[in-house]
Amino acid sequence: KVQYSAQKIWQNAAKNNQNKVDVTLYAVKAGNKEEVQKLTITGNAQVQFDEVNKYGEDGEEIKYTVEESNPSVASQMVGNPIVDGTKYIFTNKVDDSAADKVQYSAQKIWQNAAKNNQNKVDVTLYAVKAGNKEEVQKLTITGNAQVQFDEVNKYGEDGEEIKYTVEESNPSVASQMVGNPIVDGTKYIFTNKVDDSAADKVQYSAQKIWQNAAKNNQNKVDVTLYAVKAGNKEEVQKLTITGNAQV
């Protein structure tokens, strides 16, 4: 007797995927294939066919072959099957259109800037493989907004989940990142504070008019500029006006 086996390897799929494929053991006699047994492999697994006669009635060794068919997912065979004695190894790469996908997004928050500001920053999606970053896609965010990257494969050819990261670069205005990006699942949130030197500015003034006093009087009064936030006043600057004047 002789016993054949078949092993299935799926690329672009999780190691524990449930993709199915049929494998059939054939006896090849006089150039014709005769089906001996058909089995189904689920996922990255191996099956064994029943033992079969090694020799035919004529005393000649029977030639057997194994073929696969009916993959349950759109895929392409990678090269030819590897034949190791009585073991056949079939490798299929799942088509990108059928592979498990994941989608990343990036959100930008600007501090010290108007809500409808037009500041720009680039955000880049990288795949991290063996410690190296490979650029996948670069987008630009304008203002306080969010962008979505194209869907990408969740698993690599080795069946391992691919690690992705998002980074920002090239802000259009002088600014500093506030802390590290917040990562919420597949969403990256970047917050930048516009430098005071580049922030939009406004300037207030105060004028004092005294009645019942000489035009050139030296009466004094303090004037204070406050920022009002959430109903609370925060002192910004205090000045003194002398006489009928403006500061």
Image: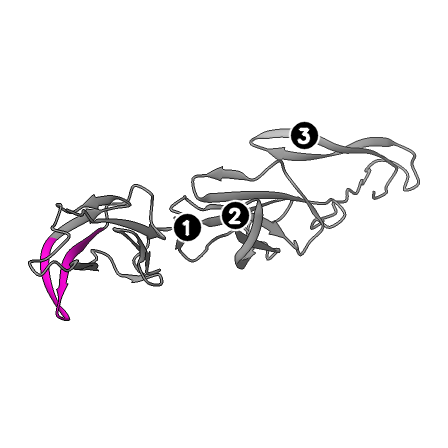
Disc 1 marks which amino acid? Gly
Q: Quadrant of residue 247?
A: top right
Q: Which residue ends up furthest to the front in the rendered image?
A: 59
Magenta-drawn stretch contains 64: no
Q: Which residue position holds label 3?
A: 234
Give the mark count: 3
Q: Which residue ends up furthest to the left in the rendered image?
A: 57
CA gap, disc 1 and disc 2: 10 Å
Q: Residue at x 35, y 63 (%)?
A: 79
Q: Return the mark for residue 156.
A: 1
- Pick whichever, 206 or 4, lies toward us: 4
The tag earlier along the polypeptide, 1 or 3, is 1
Q: Main secondary structure of the magenta part?
A: strand
Magenta segment boundaries in residue numbering: 20-37
Q: Residue at x 66, y 55 (%)?
A: 170
Q: Which residue position holds label 2?
A: 129
Within-10-Å neighbours for mark 2: few <14, some 14–19, many 20+: few
The tag earlier along the polypeptide, 3 or 2, is 2
CA gap, disc 1 and disc 3: 55 Å
- In the rendering, at what x and y percent does residue 113 appear? 63, 48
